[in-house]
Amino acid sequence: MKRWPALAFVTVLLLLNCTPPPHQLPDISPDFWRDAFGPADISSVKGGGEVLVSLEGEKYVGAADVQWKKAGDFRANFYSVFGGQIASVSADSESGTVILEGKEYRVLLDEKMDSIPFSWGEDLTFRQFISILTGRAPVNPADSGEAPDTITISRRTAEAEWQRGQLRVTARVNRRNERLEEIRYSFNQSWTVRMSDIFKGLARSVELREDDRNYFWIKYQNLKPE
């Protein structure tokens, strides 16, 4: 009977030795962070899901469908629960249009959306807005191979942060499987973008928030890269 404690101790040691430790992400190449933000070779995205929009506190619940092609074609339609169209966004290879509350806004793809009545329009280009709507990272702070400014390690995750002027980008990665779990963009505390539930490089949960009265959130049931 005295052998049982010793056998149990040996068993625990074997299990610990066989269990791979979490990756020490601060020690790996900055290329890891660049690639973690999603593949650059996606040629098209298509999907649909639920949407919650708040405009000056007036909330709309409904559905969204989006379709994007790298060649330049993009459309997104947002519908109420009764089937009426809340808003729409479309673009070709040069410019795009936003229709919201009966008003039409036209913007070139690489211009700021400052004609849109939201603070984030002063900082985001139309191209970056399309990336957000299709679950793709609008800015990759590690694209040029730059390491994060700070990395915070916990037992399960590693969170990297880049500060680029007034823009702060945070990426949270699972240390076991090296999967990106969430990306957050914050601009001078005036707006935030939160992208999560990331699969195959696309975020299936996207929230763009200006304040508690103005925001939209999309939860995609299906969002597929091609």
Image (tube, rainbow, N blue to C red):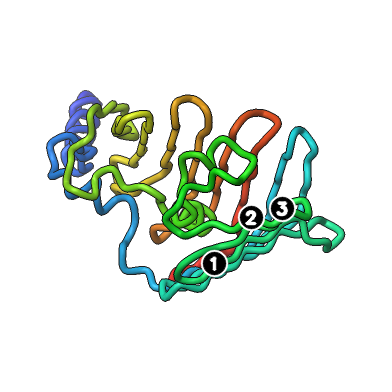
Where 5 sits versus 25, above or below? above
- Residue at the spot of label 2: 105
Gap in angstroms between the C-alphas marked 3 and 1:
15 Å
Circle 3 crowding by C-alpha within 10 Å: few under 14, some 14–19, many from 20: some
The N terminus, quarter of image: top left
- From the image, tell me which residue sits under label 3: 100
Q: Which percent across, then down, holds residue 31?
A: 17, 49
Residue at 31% x, 63% y is 40
Residue 30 position within the rendered picture, expressed as x and y whole percent measured from the top left: 16, 44
**Cα distance in 3D space between marks 2 and 3:** 8 Å
Identity, as a three-letter code, of the amino acid under mark 3: Leu
Q: Is residue 108 visible?
A: yes
The kind of residue on which mark 2 rests is Tyr
Label 3 with label 1: CB-CB less than 8 Å: no
**Disc assigned to residue 91:** 1
Residue 161 visible from this viewpoint: no
Point out the image quarter for the C terminus.
Answer: bottom left
Amino acid tagged 1: Ala
**Quarter of the figure with residue 57:** top right
Image vertical order of residue 22 relative to residue 83, above or below:
above
Q: Nearer the viewer, mark 2 or mark 3?
A: 2
- First in sequence: mark 2 or mark 1? 1
Q: Is residue 176 left or right of residue 88?
A: left
Residue contact between numbered discs 2 and 3, judged by CB atoms under 8 Å? yes
Q: Is residue 10 above or below residue 95?
A: above
| Disc sitting over residue 173 in the figure | none
Q: Residue at x 18, y 27 (%)?
A: 6
